[in-house]
């Protein structure tokens, strides 16, 4: 067991990512504190969608039902170009227990995650700012400042910066935030909307003047997003209405604005998500175009990737390496992919010029008519296709597929999700109880004692607590499972 600290992990930032990180660590019994300089959680809708893969991870966390009760399930996306429908995509067929986008304001996401964290015995410390830290070889010494100016010194084994795009942790590490800010301005309006042609659907209109997107929130409340050329200030309701009349379906009427804002798209990322005992997650590590609504989901998945690894190290089950060393290459690779894909979507949506737009619209109409391509797009948007094929944790040797090593493991409707419960255990999927029982007895804090049925008879799999395949080998190859466990345990 590592040296005992009152707080094994200090989490800076109590947005969705910091709350998810603290909740996962608390679920695994790791002493954790989470601090935020803001006096209260956000009251803005901000990030609006929770995708299928994030909901699957929330199943592990044990808080999905509350989200489903509070959100709106959306399965259909329609794309129009100058009033002509050129594409449609349904999420109803994606291979997930949650085949939809869950539309829920970030204010609600934070409320529900904070409530879930509270059930685990951890309270967010608000109006408490991380002002500096000293990352040493054996600990991190952090200085916290309260609203009244008093300061506290906290020693922890690890520090996780979930403190947003202007991260104190990132600045303290001296890590470069590389990327660009796009020059065009965008407007955002949460309004009540009448005259929607497909109520409850996401609708994207590619107009000669630019894009407008409609995203349902609840009832007749919608999020409207549009590129606005040079418009650096929050729009008026009248300006939003003018854009809807010009670019959207006939008869759209916006009323009773809840939130009006303007923004520019930042596409930035750090190269490394870890420096020694300090980690970066969420917007502290990467910010993207809002196209596809991937940002918050990517951050929550950062947290779910790191938490089980930190828990095994803090509980003394595994040495720090190679577990903690895998976090940055795994999640940085995902961050690169998300930046690339959201950047591509933004470029397509904001394309200018009659010929270019004509070609784009024609290609889109063809692409959305090819079912396998639409399926691939749906799997990508819902983040089900995310995997770690090049992870340093992946076991070497003879491999099988369906699922392959590094891929998300299929989810059964008749058994608890891999990773559920209070211990971060790996799960074996295979036959031959004798060899398995011996390994389960040898590694009781690392391997789940319940052997699950194989995904198909030709294979044997070892699945990580976050639901990704660490080993995919031929049936009966239990020595490979033993070797994988020995490597993690540092034996």
Image (cartoon, rainbow, N blue to C red):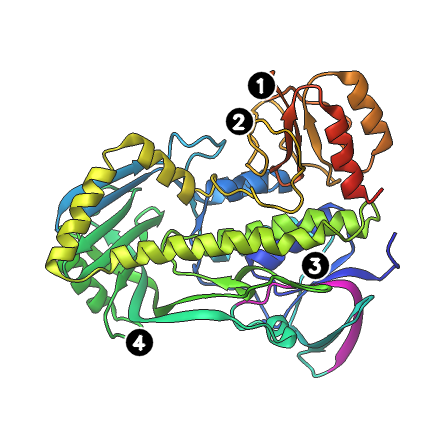
In the rendered view, tell whether residue 471 sits above or below residue 490: above
Label 1: few (<14), some (14–19) or many (≥20) C-alpha neighbours in 10 Å? some
Q: Decide whether the magenta segment is chiefly helix, strand or loop.
A: strand
Asked if residue 53 lies left or right of residue 163, the reply is left
In the rendered view, tell whether residue 1 sits above or below residue 463: below
> How far apart, in angstroms, are the residues tagged by discs 4 and 1?
57 Å
Q: Which mark is residue 456?
A: 1
Q: Are marks 1 and 2 in contact (CB under 8 Å)?
A: yes
The reply to whether residue 381 is in sight is yes
Sequence-wise, the earlier of marks 3 and 1 is 3
> How far apart, in angstroms, are the residues tagged by discs 2 and 4?
50 Å
Sequence-wise, the earlier of marks 2 and 4 is 4
Q: Are marks 2 and 3 in contact (CB under 8 Å)?
A: no
The C terminus lies in quadrant:
top right
Q: Circle 4 — which element?
A: loop
At x 52%, y 44%, the residue is 54
Q: Which mark is residue 123?
A: 3
In the picture of the structure, the residue carrying the numbered disc 2 is 402
């Amino acid at each position: 067991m590592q040296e005992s600290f009152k707080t094994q992990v200090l989490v800076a930032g109590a947005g969705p990512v910091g709350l998810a990180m603290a909740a996962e660590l608390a679920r695994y019994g790791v002493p954790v504190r989470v601090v935020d300089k803001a006096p209260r959680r956000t009251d803005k809708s901000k990030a609006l969608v929770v995708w299928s893969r994030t909901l699957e991870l929330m199943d592990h966390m044990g808080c999905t039902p509350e989200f489903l009760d509070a959100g709106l399930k959306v399965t259909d996306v329609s794309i129009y170009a100058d009033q002509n429908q050129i594409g449609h995509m349904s999420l109803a067929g994606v291979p997930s227990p949650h085949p939809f986008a869950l539309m829920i304001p970030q204010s609600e996401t934070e409320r529900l995650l904070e409530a879930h964290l509270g059930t685990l015995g951890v309270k967010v410390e608000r109006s408490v700012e991380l002002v500096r830290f000293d990352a040493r070889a054996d600990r991190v010494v952090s200085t916290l400042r309260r609203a009244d100016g008093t300061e506290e010194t906290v020693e922890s084994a690890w520090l996780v910066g979930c403190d947003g795009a202007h991260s104190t942790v990132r600045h303290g590490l001296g890590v470069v935030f590389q990327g660009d800010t796009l020059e065009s301005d965008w407007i955002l309006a949460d309004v009540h909307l009448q005259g929607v042609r497909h109520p409850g659907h996401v609708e994207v209109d590619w107009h000669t003047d630019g894009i407008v997107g409609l995203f349902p929130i609840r009832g007749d409340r919608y999020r409207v997003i549009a590129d606005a050329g040079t418009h650096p200030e929050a729009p008026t309701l009248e300006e939003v209405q003018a854009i809807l009349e010009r670019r959207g379906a006939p008869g759209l009427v916006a009323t009773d604005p809840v939130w009006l804002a303007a923004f520019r798209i930042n596409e930035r990322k750090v190269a490394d998500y870890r420096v020694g005992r300090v980690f970066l997650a969420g917007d502290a590590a990467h910010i993207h175009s809002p196209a596809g609504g991937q940002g918050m989901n990517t951050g929550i998945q950062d947290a779910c990737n790191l938490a089980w690894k930190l828990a095994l190290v803090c509980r003394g089950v595994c040495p720090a390496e190679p577990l903690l060393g895998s976090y940055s290459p795994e999640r940085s690779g995902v961050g690169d992919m998300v930046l690339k894909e959201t950047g591509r979507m933004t470029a397509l949506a904001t394309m200018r010029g009659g010929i270019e737009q004509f070609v784009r619209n024609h290609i889109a109409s063809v692409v959305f008519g090819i079912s396998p391509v639409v399926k691939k797009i749906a799997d990508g948007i819902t983040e089900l296709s995310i995997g770690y094929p090049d992870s340093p944790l992946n076991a070497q040797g003879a491999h099988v597929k369906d699922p392959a090593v590094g891929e998300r493991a299929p989810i059964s409707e008749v058994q608890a999700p891999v990773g559920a419960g209070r211990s971060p255990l790996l799960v074996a999927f295979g036959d031959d109880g004798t060899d398995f029982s011996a390994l389960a007895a040898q590694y009781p804090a690392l391997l789940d004692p319940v052997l699950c049925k194989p995904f198909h008879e030709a294979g044997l799999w070892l699945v990580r607590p976050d639901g990704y395949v660490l080993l995919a080998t031929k049936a009966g190859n239990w020595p490979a499972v033993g070797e994988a466990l020995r490597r993690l345990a540092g034996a």
